[in-house]
Amino acid sequence: MRAGLVLLLLLVATLAHATVYKWVDENGKVHFSDKPVKNAEVVELNENTQNSIKLPDPIVLPSLNTPADSDKASYKLNIASPSEEETIRSNEGKITLIANSDPQLSSAHEFVLYMDGQQLGSAQKSGQFKLSDIDRGEHSFVIKVLSKNGKQLAATPPRKVFLHRTSLNQPKAIRPQPRSN
């Protein structure tokens, strides 16, 4: 088995080291081949034909944002409640939103709530927002964390919530009438 493998490797090595011929045709076009042609000359190949490319050293750009000491941490913020596309049934239009951050925020940071792109109320220290008298329908909420100088540190992805409220305009349910036979 080993002798066959060695023989195969020698055969492949001799085929890989074939002679290369070069000639120019009557139109002046240069041709290369591994088969000799009339007026062809043998091309001598260098042993080392590998190209070596030196990659440039990467350039480290200085950071444009140099946060203050309290702002150096990277915060992850998410809305824990309500869940995405949750339907809330409340005739008073009450919605409670709860935000969690990782790592915990310092006392200098504040939460701001946005509903449908508009800020609701002022910034507060707690990540819990209790809303009331919200119109029925679909609403999108975003909660942002701000540093003491007003710089945004983190924001949640938009959270879509549906609020259902009973309306006086809804038609009365029609009771089915019994059939008389």
Image: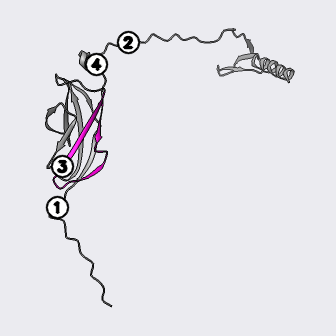
Instruction: Identify which residue, 46 or 107, lies in the foreground.
Output: 107
Residue behind mark 2: 60
Give the crowd class for mark 3: few <14, some 14-19, many >=20 residues within 10 Å. Answer: some
Secondary structure category for the residue under label 2: loop
| Mark 1 residue type | Ser
| Mark 4 residue type | Lys
Earlier sequence position, callout 1 versus callout 4: 4
Earlier sequence position, callout 1 versus callout 3: 3
The image quarter containing residue 166 is: bottom left
Earlier sequence position, callout 4 versus callout 2: 2
Residue behind mark 4: 72
Contact between marks 1 and 3 (CB within 8 A): the answer is: no
Earlier sequence position, callout 1 versus callout 2: 2
Residue behind mark 1: 167
Select label 3 or label 2 by which is in front: 3
Contact between marks 3 and 4 (CB within 8 A): the answer is: no
Say left or right for 107 vs 44: left
Alpha carbons under labels 1 and 3: distance apart:
15 Å
Alpha carbons under labels 3 and 2: distance apart:
51 Å
Task: Give the magenta range.
Answer: 76-102
Give the crowd class for mark 1: few <14, some 14-19, many >=20 residues within 10 Å. Answer: few
Query: In x, y percent, where is residue 180?
Result: 30, 89
The image quarter containing residue 165 is: bottom left
Alpha carbons under labels 4 and 2: distance apart:
19 Å
Contact between marks 4 and 2 (CB within 8 A): the answer is: no
Earlier sequence position, callout 3 versus callout 4: 4
